[in-house]
């Protein structure tokens, strides 16, 4: 009787362990995919921040334009953090258009 109980417990632990390992493998693969997407988003964000910084240093932006650009950069950063890369790219496009607009 003890052998059956011990064998049953061992089988239960064996199956539970392999199911847990499979779940961990899936989570790791999903995390790798997310990290790659986030890296591209962060790189775009860094380029846009540099562009805004360079224009601000060159006094090519008004205070209102600089404030708006920084607000848009904050929004894009939030989108990147949430994994919403399409919205982040659109917002970064707005930043680029704002900063690159011809002076009147």
Image (spheres, rainbow, N blue to C red):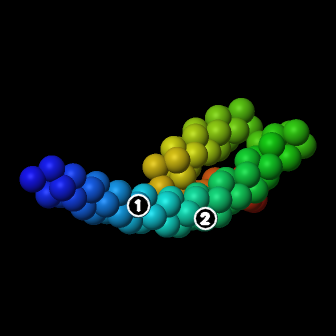
Image coordinates for residue 11, horizontal then vertical, percent: 24, 61
Image coordinates for residue 103, horizontal then vertical, percent: 77, 53
Camera-side residue of 40 and 54: 40
Is residue 71 rendered to the left or right of residue 45?
left
Which residue does the image show at 73% across and 52% down from the upper left?
Answer: 46
Q: Is residue 90 visible?
A: no
* Mark 1 residue crowding within 10 angstroms, few (<14) / some (14–19) / many (20+): few
- Marks 2 and 1, the one that precedes in the sequence: 1
Above or below residue 16? Residue 54 is above
* Mark 2 residue crowding within 10 angstroms, few (<14) / some (14–19) / many (20+): few
Q: Quadrant of residue 58?
A: top right
Camera-side residue of 35 and 12: 12
Mark 2 to mark 1 CA distance (whole Å): 23 Å
Q: Is residue 47 visible?
A: yes
Image coordinates for residue 21, horizontal then vertical, percent: 40, 60
Camera-side residue of 10 and 85: 10
Q: Quadrant of residue 20?
A: bottom left
Image coordinates for residue 63, horizontal then vertical, percent: 71, 33
Nearer to us: label 2 or label 1 = 1
Above or below residue 43? Residue 72 is above
Q: Secondary structure at mark 1?
A: helix
Which residue does the image show at 75% across and 56% down from the upper left?
Answer: 47
Which label sits on residue 21?
A: 1
Which residue does the image show at 65% across and 54% down from the upper left?
Answer: 42
Residue projecting furthest to the left = 1
Which label sits on residue 36?
A: 2
Residue projecting furthest to the right = 58
Is residue 57 rendered to the left or right of residue 65?
right
Which residue does the image show at 73% across and 47% down from the upper left?
Answer: 49
């Amino acid at each position: 009787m003890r052998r059956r109980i011990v064998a049953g417990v061992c089988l239960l632990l064996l199956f539970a362990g392999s199911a847990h390992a499979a779940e961990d493998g899936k989570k790791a693969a999903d995390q790798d995919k997310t990290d790659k997407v986030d890296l591209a988003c962060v790189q775009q964000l860094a380029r846009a921040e540099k562009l805004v910084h360079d224009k601000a240093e060159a006094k090519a932006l008004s205070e209102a334009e600089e404030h708006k650009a920084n607000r848009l950069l904050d929004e894009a950063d939030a989108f990147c953090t949430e994994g919403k890369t399409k919205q982040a790219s659109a917002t970064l496009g707005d930043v680029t258009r704002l900063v690159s607009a011809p002076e009147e």
